[in-house]
Image (cartoon, helix red, strand yellow):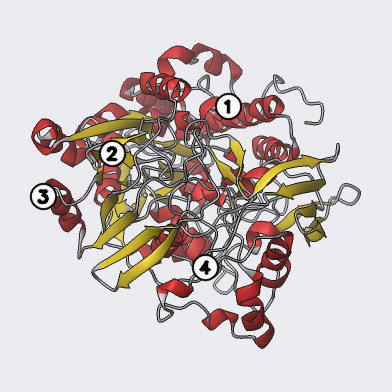
Amino acid sequence: MWGSSRRWPGSGSGSHHRRQGPGGRPARAGWWALTALAILAAMLAVACRDDAPEADEAAAQAEVAVTETDVEAALPDAEADQSDAEADQPDPEASQPDVVAELRANAAAFEYGIGTPGGRLTYATIADPLTFNLALANDAGSASYLGYLFEGLTEISWLTDEVEPALAESWEHSDDGLTWTFHLRRDVTWHDGEPFTAADVEFTFNRIIYNDDIPANSRAAFTFRFPDPETGEWREAPMTVTTIDDYTVQYVLPVSFAPFLRSMGQAIFPKHLLEEAVDAGTFNETWGLDTPPSEIIGTGPFTIEEYVPGDHITLRRYEHYWMRDAEGNSLPYLDTVHYRIVPDLAAELAVFQSGEADYHGVLGEEYAELEALQEEGNFTIYRRGPAFGTTFLAFNMNPGANAESGAAYVAPEKLAWFSNVDFRRAVAYSIDKQAIIADVLHGQGYPQWASVSPAAGDFHNPDVRRYEYDPDQARAILDDLGWVDGDGDGVREDGDGNPIRFALITNSGNNVREQVTVRIQQGLEAIGIQADYEAVEFGDMVTALVSTYEWETLVVGFTGGTDPYGGIVFWHSSEDLHLWHPQQAEPATDWEAEIDDLYVRGSQELDRAERVALYHRAQAIAAENVPVVYTTLPERLGAVRNVFGNTTPTLYGLWDVRYLYRIDQ
């Protein structure tokens, strides 16, 4: 749904039935569209059941948008104490979960076997599709089901996370990274037998995605916004898409964009079936749920055989799919993929435990019970390492005021506290991440130190400053600030006598997040800070974050992915989702200015090693200045029935559904 990279099966953009417990912008494509829906999705898609065995990039699939640079340069003086940093550096090896290395080894050693045709893969899910029109789909359920039917020019390996050919068999680009030429496969047909050609690609972009009359979910993903190299003013421009011949298509970008190949996972749609609706202005009503499933035509490995609302959706193998195994046998091996639609999350678990489903995304609180049932239930629980999504504590450092009332968004004394890096570091030391893992995640998780998860591979910086739980250190920092409990009521006062007391909110209905917030409140109380905790309606929290800006501190979560570029909407100071001080005309601090610059260059640099260095630097700066305090990353756990071949746990999935086969036939 995001016009971005994909894996098989499903949408390649996250879970098919996730369980909830998951301004100026540099050049972009395939990133988070800044709509209310995207904001909701970004915050909700964490602390949830991992139900994406085949691919697990979530909103990073939203992936979303060097020149010479001294990435080793000292941090700006503003809020960066280098001597403290050097004394607090972690052991890089100790900060990398062992499971990450194990999963990489699994991927490196894996080889596909020759499978047996036939059989079924069954899931249980609470998600009905809301549309059969993937170009308009804005829900995970629809995007996941339709992802079996539609493909892009590229796809992402579930083994290595590398870009691989899909509908395009090869490509090349100009030295400046602006012109990309794709050579299409000549053996691909649509499900109705019509040939797939470059005309379909050009139609998808120029007639659907860039059509102002169609609310295409990926238009923002392919609208580039970037600083003009001469004026510094922000510009917006699309790319141009032209056909060279029937099997060659060319893209010209307005600015170099590093994740461009990943964004070419954008689904391609059939011109011969949809052009008439586009011309007539009826595309937005095309392929609704009342459309016979046989009329939903793609190029993918499965078609929709049957959909019964509230009961099931069944996908059937496309007999003439283009992909073959190493011996030339037609793929996919499976005859059908079947989703049982159930009323609630408890029913999902019950269906799996009864043996009627083949996969179940396991929550921490379910692990102990299911672990004991593995032999009896003929299934294995696989660990897939730390999640990509994050949960963090944020401080409101917005110095603005309500335009109508003139009231400050944050009381001046609280703004002063939150803007003090030593205060934020003291808070960071007060959070017991190991206790959160033990008590909230039931032992199934990891502490998070860097803004990028270790699951992101070399983009993760293991060397950032860490704030291990140390309430004594937190108290010492506050004492040094002169913020002490002068009246003996258990709450410290600042230098002006103001009690260090503020509101702490999170959204109600997310049990994991609520428990994490309570642990944070308790840690703050132990160092003499009073945080008044309240769980609020999710919509109210979103309004406070992106509209009224009237909040003090909060705990929220965002999705993540394998490419740090997706985080640009959070880290760039001009962005709406730069939560602590959004939409800055100019960076308020030197460290924010440097992060802005790093993310801009990271979005345009094509050399991966250079990009890694840039994003490592950005993570180090973020950890030094702690505008948000990261908490924990849940373990991704998946229970799989022991009846399938060509499976192995990796950081990015458990299988490619096209190669999956049953060994019990």
Q: Where residue 550 appears, x then y in whole percent?
A: 47, 61
Residue visible at 51% across and 42% down in the picture:
324
Label 2 sits on a secondary structure element that is strand
Give the residue type at disc 4.
Ile
Q: Are marks 3 and 2 in contact (CB under 8 Å)?
A: no
Q: Are marks 2 and 4 in contact (CB under 8 Å)?
A: no
Q: Where residue 531 appears, x then y in whole percent?
A: 32, 46
Q: Where residue 144 appears, x then y in whole percent?
A: 42, 57
Q: Nearer the viewer, mark 4 or mark 3?
A: 4
Q: Nearer the viewer, mark 1 or mark 2?
A: 2
Seen as rendered, the residue at the extreme front is: 328
Cα distance in 3D space between marks 4 and 1: 47 Å
Between 270 and 325, the one nearer to me in the picture: 325
Q: Residues within 10 Å of mark 3 (few under 14, many from 20)?
A: few
Cα distance in 3D space between marks 2 and 4: 31 Å
Q: Tell me which label, 4 or 1, sits earlier in the chain.
A: 4
